[in-house]
Image: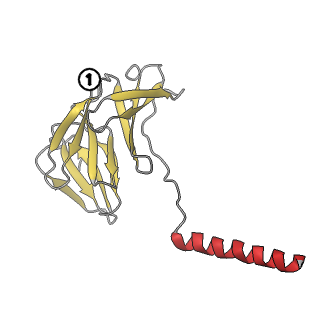
Amino acid sequence: GSLNWHGLAADESAGLLYSIDMNNSNTLVSVTPGGVITTIGTGTGIQGRGMAFDNNNDILYATGPDSLSPSSLYTVDTTTGTATLIGSTGISSYIIGLEYDETNAILYMLADLDNFGSGFSNLYSLNTATGAATLIGSTGVSSLDGIASLPTSVPEPSTILLLGAGLAGVGFLRRRFKS
C-alpha cells in the first residue's frame, strides 16, 4: 500500500472517503467504512492536498497541480478519477486543506503564508465557478495541517410539531389557571 496520500474528503451518501495517492501516479482512491481501498482511474494529474466533497451536489473538489505553484481548483470525477480544471486560486502558498460548508454553500481553503515558515495560515473562501480565492483572514496559527467544519443542526419537523404542541399546552394550562 501507499504511504503518501494527500487530502481527504467524505461522500456521506455513498459512505466513502476519497484521497489522492501520490505514490501511484496521483490516482484517486476510495475507502469504505470496512477499509476496502479501490483505485479509480489512472491518475488525476494533481496532488490534491486539499480535498472536499459537496454532498448536496455530489461534487468532489481538489487543489492542484501541486501545493507550491499557483494552485488551482479542480473537480474530480469519482467514477473515472479524471480531474477537470475550474480555475486558478491566485494563491501560491502551501495549500493544506479544503472544506465544503453545505449549510452555507461555501468552499473554504486553508493555506500557509510562507510555505513551512514562521508565517500564519490563512483562511480563504473559493469561488466554485472560477476557482478564485477571497481572503477571510489569518488563523493566527502557523503550519496548520487540515480544516473541518461542524454541521449546523436543524430540528426535524416532528421536533418542531412537538415543541408547538407543548407550547400550546402550556398556554392552555396558564389560561385555565387564570380563570
Circle 1: residue type: Pro
Q: Residues within 10 Å of mark 1 (few under 14, many from 20)?
A: some
At 44% across and 46% down in the image, what residue appears?
A: 104
- At which x and y percent is residue 117? 43, 19
At 13% across and 43% down in the image, what residue appears?
A: 43
At 64% across and 71% down in the image, what residue appears?
A: 164
Residue 169 is left or right of residue 48, and the answer is right
- At which x and y percent is residue 176? 84, 80
Q: Is residue 77 visible?
A: yes
Q: Nearer the viewer, residue 145 or 56?
A: 56
Q: Is residue 32 above or below residue 45?
A: below
Q: Secondary structure at mark 1?
A: loop
Q: Is residue 4 visible?
A: no
Residue 127 location, quadrant: top left
Residue on which disc 1 sits: 70
- At which x and y percent is residue 168? 70, 74
Residue 91 location, quadrant: top left
Q: Is residue 98 above or below residue 120?
A: below
- At which x and y percent is residue 153? 53, 58
Q: How is the image coloured?
A: secondary structure
At 35% across and 23% down in the image, what residue appears?
A: 93
Q: Quadrant of the C terminus?
A: bottom right
Residue 117 is left or right of residue 17, and the answer is right
Q: Is residue 63 above or below residue 59?
A: above
The mark total stands at 1
